[in-house]
Image (cartoon, grey):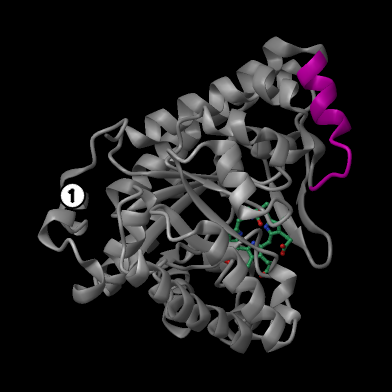
Amino acid sequence: MLPFKLKPCMAEKILSPELSPDLSRFGMSQGSRFLRACLRQPVDRTPVWFLRQAGRYMPEYQAVRRRHSLLEICKNPDLAAEVTITAAEKLDVDAAIIFADLLLPLEGMGLDFEFLAGEGPVIHQPVRTAADVENLRIDRANELGYVSEAIRKVVAHFHDRIGIIGFCGAPFTLASYMIEGGGSRNYTFTKTLMYREPSVWQLLLEKLAAVLEQYASQQVEAGADVIQIFDSWAGALSPSDYRDFVLPITTRLVRRVQALGVPVIYFGVDTASLLPAMRETGADVIGLDWRVPLDQGWAALGHAVAVQGNLDPITLFANEDLLRQRVRQILEQAGGRPGHIFNLGHGIVPGTPVENVQRVVQYVREFSLGDHVRA
Ligand code: CP3
């Protein structure tokens, strides 16, 4: 039983298992394979896609990027859709994640930022005081309409052929960018605010969640099949801090996105000790990073949730034999159990050989087909 009601068109996209008990004989569309795995329904083979599958390692993206800044691409629905579609087709994956960036919602909230070459994002006026938090606006989520516009174009291209993933940041990870002013090693400013001014912290997270909920809703309205919530830096927190300061608001966001009628994938890095608490958000799928063996991570979560992952993205620089071995190992750890989506443990990095990403798709097909036929 699902904890929420799927939006009506989703139910059609997901083949009823009763129709084809021997799924391996019939095959299924890539889209329904991906959606079914999110909901832990049996599939003919393990679905696969890659975190950051459309980024700088791809010559086609580099060509677009030479003519436009990252933000120009994100804000131009034609370009964002083109980059999304090209990557998904070139890799022949089961799902496409919309090309956008985690930080886009910050702009409408009143924070200017830019991406500096080699340094990553820089937020010019970080949020540090109660007044800074009070000044954040939550009434301009409609300015993010370019992302849902791009989703509409991707959906018009693929229809139901592959899964379409919309995404947003989680309140903690976005708050950390707002407070630190960029990436961070120790999260000193973030944790100081969290420990010393819990009511200001709470207001900040609530404002973020309010915007993210509207943003996710626009994406679902535009046709996103699933929303992935990136809590990339949650691993900076101890389990107690995660539970006390982050879990309640994240749970609320997850439930509200599910209430839109779509499954939620909740992902973080370095989360081995947080998994049982992350599970409590009620997300349908938990993304695992590569530091935890997939079988151990899945056991820590309990098997009543789907998992996504978890090849080390740097394995894509290894030789074919090792790559093959690691892909097989992850599939063996998943054991053909319904509810595994093959992915990396974090995003593809620049310089990754595209052929190796394509090879992983082939290996997943070869190995997992065998598993599911045997199952
Ligand atoms: O398939 C895709 O590549 C989807 C597009 C996508 C981007 N950002 C475009 C991007 C996605 C899914 C994101 C999410 C994102 N952005 C996250 C969460 C995912 C994760 O890796 O944990 C985070 C933390 C960000 C913030 C961000 N944006 C950082 C830290 C950086 C700089 C460092 C880096 O990895 O490049 C960015 C820039 C960025 N966002 C680029 C791209 C393609 C590269 C810059 C460029 O093209 O100029």
Left or right of 219: which side holds 21?
Answer: left
Count the labels in the image: 1
Q: Quadrant of ligand 1?
A: bottom right
Give the image location of residue 141, x and y in percent: 45, 39
The secondary structure that most of the magenta stretch takes on is: helix
From the viewer's perspective, is 363 left or right of 12? right
The residue lying at 27 percent from left, 34 percent from top is 1
Residue placed at 55% from the left, 64% from the top?
332
The residue beneath circle 1 is 11
Q: Nearer the viewer, residue 293 or 138?
A: 293
Please state the horizontal and vertical placement of residue 187, each as a whole percent of the image: 84, 35
At 35% from the left and 63% from the top, the residue drawn is 375
Amino acid found under the numbered disc labelled 1: Ala
Secondary structure beneath label 1? helix
Between 236 and 28, the one lying in front of the other is 28
* Residue 299 located left or right of residue 28: right
Q: Is residue 103 visible?
A: no
Instruction: Give residue 217's quadrant in the image.
Output: top left
Q: Is residue 318 above or below residue 12?
A: below
Quadrant of the rendered structure where residue 178 is? top right
Depth order, front residue of 299/125: 299
Spot occupied by residue 201 in the image (x, y as percentages of width and height): 69, 19
Toward the left, the furthest residue is 19
Q: How dense is the environment of label 1, judged by Cα within 10 Å: few (below 14), some, or many (20 and up)?
A: some
Stretch of the chain drawn in magenta: 183-195
Q: Is residue 264 above or below residue 164?
A: above
Please say whether residue 247 is visible from this viewpoint. yes
- Residue 201 is a magenta residue: no
Residue at the spot 88% in from the left edge and 31% down from the top edge: 188
